[in-house]
Amino acid sequence: MHVLPRPTDRDVRGSAGAVAELAGVGVRRSGSDLLRDVSVQVDNRGHLAVLGPNGAGKTTLLRILSTYLFPTSGTAAVLGTTFGRGDLRELRHRIGFVSVGLDPLTHERAAALPLVAVARRGGLWPPPGILDDAGLRAAAEAALARVGAGHLADRRVDTLSQGERQRVRIARALVTEPDLLLLDEPFAGLDLGGREALLADVERLLADPDGPTVVMVSHHLEELPPTIRSALLLRAGRVVAAGATDEVLTGEAVSAAFGVGLDVRRVGGRWTATARL
């Protein structure tokens, strides 16, 4: 998964090193292996899709990349810091994590703009007057605009559709200007129109040369943006295949990962998988 980095004014985005690197990583809980012997490297702007069935270890992998979970074996490094050899807390403001599982922590009765603004300060509940800071307001407006959600600025989050809420979640992550953005099933719960509209916005984000490196978890090949060039297939915590999408997303490998015979095709840059008849 080696992609030549593009130079920018951000140190990590202009370096030749990996944004994240796992070597022989395992996570064991209550006698079970959630991950076992997982090795993967995510290079600067080398956007990665992680796919597999329920229980494959996808979210566990994201939790390691977010620095909130230590592996029980192997070595892990994120943004140049190896776990156990540096203060991971210093990295967390450089990592955006988007997951519906974080919703209970946020104040969904707030309007979208102040909720995005407070995320830049590391907060969950926007205090009165937060938008009086012109710089903070501008940053929040820009983050919403990047995901096509500028028109939602004054809407209460609890009145939004699932697709609109997902845009606000992503904007909250982007407002911190992360170097690494983790998307945990960003299209879950969306209807076809909502999925395709959000996918177009995510595709623009991935193509932005000043944007973050993205790792995206999904169950479905149809959800992969065309600019995803690397993929990792997991099953029962183990790697089935890893590398360039064209090499990984084959009928044989995807069938092995999901435990069912599948035909895999790519049309117009988009992937699809259907059961073999």
Image (tube, rainbow, N blue to C red):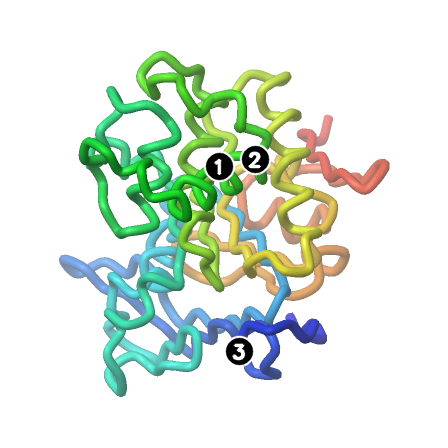
Q: Neighbour class for label 1 at 10 Å: few (<14), some, many (≥20)?
A: many
Residue 73 figure quarter? bottom left
1 or 3: tag closer to the N-terminus: 3
3 or 2: tag closer to the N-terminus: 3
Q: Quadrant of the C terminus?
A: top right
Task: Identify the residue at image location x=85%, y=37%.
Answer: 268
**Residue type highlighted by circle 2:** Ala
Callouts 1 and 3 close, C-beta under 8 Å? no
Residue 145 bears which disc, if any? 2
Task: Identify the residue at image location x=53%, y=21%.
Answer: 151
Percent across and percent down for residue 133 are 33, 43
Percent across and percent down for residue 62 are 38, 56
Q: Quadrant of the N terminus?
A: bottom right
Res. 56 visible in picture? no
Where is 263 relative to 238, above or below? above
Percent across and percent down for residue 127 are 18, 35
Tag 1 secondary structure = helix
Q: Neighbour class for label 2 at 10 Å: few (<14), some, many (≥20)?
A: some
Image-based side of 241 in relation to 182, left or right: right
Given residues 216 and 91, the one toward you in this image is 91
Task: Identify the residue at image location x=58%, y=40%.
Answer: 146
Image-based side of 53 in relation to 115, left or right: right
Image-based side of 144 in relation to 272, left or right: left
Estimate the spatial distance between the alpha carbons at disc 1 and disc 3, rounded to whole Å: 25 Å
Residue denoted by label 1: 141
Given residues 47 and 217, the one toward you in this image is 47
Estimate the spatial distance between the alpha carbons at disc 2 and disc 1, rounded to whole Å: 6 Å
Residue denoted by label 3: 11
Tag 3 secondary structure = helix
**Residue type highlighted by circle 3:** Asp
Callouts 2 and 1 close, C-beta under 8 Å? yes
Residue 61 figure quarter? bottom left
